[in-house]
Image (tube, rainbow, N blue to C red):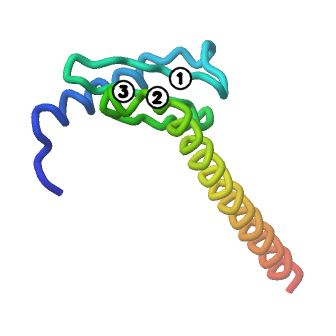
Amino acid sequence: MGTASPTQRRTNNLCGRLKDERDPISYDAESNAIIKLNNGMVLYMREVNKFLALVCLVREEHFEKHGLIDYNFECFKSAITEVFEVRNKLAAARAAKSSALALANQQL
């Protein structure tokens, strides 16, 4: 992994501050933040779920296609939700298998 440039470090710090300063009570599934930076970029943050937010850096002239960005976000949100659902189902199946094995061992 290479060394981050000063611009990348500043951007990472800004994204970290956005995450740290969020008030969980004031956010819901439709919450977002749009910040126009002084370097011609737009920082766009949308909540995926209560544990995850997607942060994008987009050139200001490309941010005019806001609908396309929102569409791609919804595709990402749907896919990541599916990943979490599969993970939860696998974890539940493993737990059930472990319980069944423990019960079988106790009966021996």
> Real-space Cα distance between discs 2 and 1?
5 Å
Residue 48 sits above or below residue 84 on the image: above
For the point 80% across and 68% down, the residue is 96
Front in this rendered view, residue 24 or 28: 28
Q: Earlier in the sequence, mark 2 or mark 1?
A: 1
Q: How far across and down, in percent of the image, does residue 51 sit? A: 56, 36
In the structure shown, which secondary structural element does the residue marked by tag 3 occupy? strand
Q: Amino acid at mark 3?
A: Leu
Estimate how packed mark 3 is, as few (under 14), some (14 to 19) or many (20 or more) residues with alpha carbons within 10 Å. some
Residue 77 sits above or below residue 25 on the image: below
Q: CB of mark 2 within 8 Å of CB of mark 3?
A: yes
Q: How far across and down, in percent of the image, does residue 78 sit? A: 66, 49
Q: Quadrant of the N terminus?
A: bottom left
Front in this rendered view, residue 82 or 92: 82
Q: How far across and down, in percent of the image, does residue 18 sit? A: 39, 22
Residue under numbered circle 1: 32
Q: How far across and down, in percent of the image, does residue 46 sit? A: 52, 30
Q: How many labels sit on residues? A: 3
Residue under numbered circle 3: 43
Q: CB of mark 1 within 8 Å of CB of mark 3?
A: no
Q: Amino acid at mark 2?
A: Met
Front in this rendered view, residue 8 or 39: 39
Q: Earlier in the sequence, mark 1 or mark 3?
A: 1
Q: CB of mark 2 within 8 Å of CB of mark 1?
A: yes
Front in this rendered view, residue 104 or 3: 3
Residue under numbered circle 2: 45
For the point 48% across and 18% down, the residue is 22
Q: Residue furthest bottom?
A: 108
| 22 left or right of 35 in image | right
Residue 67 sits above or below residue 18 on the image: below
